[in-house]
Image: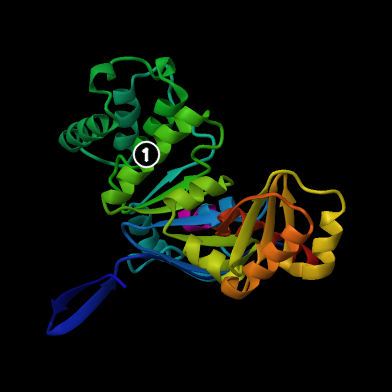
Amino acid sequence: MAETQTISNNVVIRSVIMLRVNNLSKQFDGRIAVQNLSFELKPGMVLGLIGPNGAGKTTTMRLILGLLKPTRGTITVDNFDMLDDGSARRAKQRIGFLPENPALYENLTAYKNLYYIAQLYGMNKSEIDGRVGELLEMLGIEKRIEHRVKTYSKGMKQKIAIARAIVHNPTYLLLDEPTASLDPASAKTVREFIKELRSSRRGILLATHNLHEAQELCDEIVVLSTKPLARGKPGELAQTLFSARTAVYANGIPEGLEQVLKERFGKRYLGRKKNKMLFATESPEQENPEIISLLVSQNVKIQFVEKENATLEDVYMKLVNQNGREK
């Protein structure tokens, strides 16, 4: 837990440096949008919110921003209470936000886009000039600062939108589906920019449907379906929810083999995709020889065998499907 200490009248005052959400819930006319959500976001950390449409990701961000009032729960930003009118303004100054569909002023230059937003945050001219210049250098577009935004690629536009969200130099940045409408090249550009922002000790809350992106960028993940289903590091979630897995690749699968494998291994046989058969193995050293022996007896021409780790997509599908069955 990051803390700073100050001394006032011989009393040590501790300030907790993090964005903290505790037992957050929101209902709309009796419909639950977010339920009992808790997490901590520290500077230099990327925390991912993943879940299906309607899971509460955007609602959570709007609650943190103060655009919605929670039904219950608390939100604090560096010890400032977001739900207290007296401290909410100072809390909001520490947060930047990129909505899913940001609206840039496309007939203005990148410089003027950033300059205008900085003015809205109450920054003076000398502060603005220095900060805007710093951001444009970070974006690598110093030579195009007088070009209108409408002439930029989608990836560059999104980078400018993110830069606009951090022009006031917030400690925390909320990104709602930052690559959702981008082509692969533009999405990669934005992901690299997010990595740069994390290295500058900025806490980032990332809501995304892109599970590969979440696995690449996030230090921790919250799987959300109105209520939190799991939280942890991507790799640790997979290890917690899945046993070791053995993948066997073969040159052709004999007819009738599927039924033989189901009868012999039951739920330990996870199925196949094309020429790959997948098995759950609690003890690979003991179970793999049994699997190979059966396949050889069925005249399967094995190409190679390897250990396969569960992915974030596997974690997501298991948790969300399980939650759907429980409802």
Identify the image quadrant of the N terminus: bottom left
Q: Quickly name the residue at label 1.
A: 192
| 20 lies above or below 271 | below
Left or right: 93, with 176 as reference point: left
Residue at image position (75%, 64%) is 294
Placement of 136 over or under 13, stated as above or below: above
- Residue 327, given in percent of the width and then of the height, sits at 79, 67
Using the image as rendered, state which of residue 141 and residue 30 is in the foreground.
141
Q: Give the percent coordinates (x, y) of residue 243.
A: 61, 70
At mark 1, the secondary structure is: helix
Left or right of 193 in this view: 291? right
Q: Position of residue 186 (x, y in %)?
A: 46, 29
Q: Is residue 71 visible to us here?
A: no
Instruction: Please state the extent of the stretch shown in magenta in the rendering.
Output: 62-66
User: Would residue 249 be counted in the magenta stretch?
Assistant: no
Q: Residue at x 76, y 68 (%)?
A: 267
